[in-house]
Structure formats: structure tokens, C-alpha cells
Amino acid sequence: MSVTVKDVEHVAALARLSFSQDEKERLTHELNEILQYMEQLNSLDTSTVEPLSHVIQLQNVFREDEIRPGVSREDALKNAPVHSEKFFKVPKVIGDR
């Protein structure tokens, strides 16, 4: 399979791009080189290679669960522009019907 100038024009139209004739020919050549390289890769025997989800081995790193002190209610309410005894006051977000 090879890419033609007509294919490049079609993809460019789908992407709403415009190219000069020289650019279309250059892109056709570059895309064909990419396809040739992919064919070269397809010829390799990968039957003994295990499929990968990532190139490098990944593992989750979890920290130990520890109870740590949080912010006290009084300290949290100090930063609130408006609050009542122990609650933040915010504007109403659900209107009446």
C-alpha cells in the first residue's frame, strides 16, 4: 500500500488544511517512507515477545496509611469570608421553581 498525492489531498481536506503542490509531494514521500518502515517492522518475528502495555516496567507506589492531624474546624473557618458557628456559608446554588 502506498500513499498518493490524492490521498494527501483527501486527508488535508478532512483536516481543513491546505498545502502547496510541493508540500503535497513532500508529504506523500514522507508518508510512504513511514509505511515502508512499518512494513520492515511487520517482517520481524515477534512471536516470542510478550505484549507490553508500557515500554518500561511500572508498578504503583503506595505509601503506608497513617493517621495524621488535620486542620481544626476553627482554623479552617478562619479562612472563610462568611461562616456560622461551625459551617461555611455559601451562596444558594439551587433556585426556587
Image: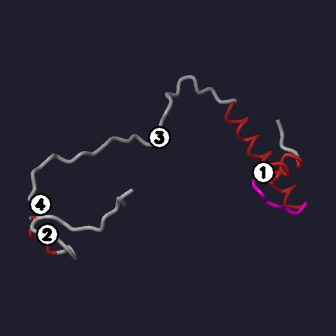
Give the residue type at disc 3.
His
First in sequence: mark 1 vs mark 3: 1
Q: Quadrant of the C terminus?
A: bottom left
- Mark sitting on residue 22: none
- Mark sitting on residue 54: 3
Question: Looking at the picture, how far across and down is residue 25, in whole percent?
Answer: 88, 55
Give the residue type at disc 1.
Leu
Q: Quadrant of residue 94?
A: bottom left
Question: Looking at the picture, how far across and down is residue 44, in whole percent?
Answer: 65, 30
- Mark sitting on residue 14: 1
First in sequence: mark 4 vs mark 1: 1
Tag 1–tag 2 contact (CB < 8 Å): no
Tell which of 76 and 5 is nearer to you: 76
Work out how far the residue at label 2 is from the one at label 4, CA to CA, in angstroms. 20 Å
- Element marked by disc 2: loop
The residue segment tinted magenta is 14-21
Work out how far the residue at label 4 is from the one at label 3, CA to CA, in angstroms. 37 Å
Give the residue type at disc 2.
Ser
Q: Is residue 95 magenta?
A: no
Q: Which residue is mark 2?
A: 84
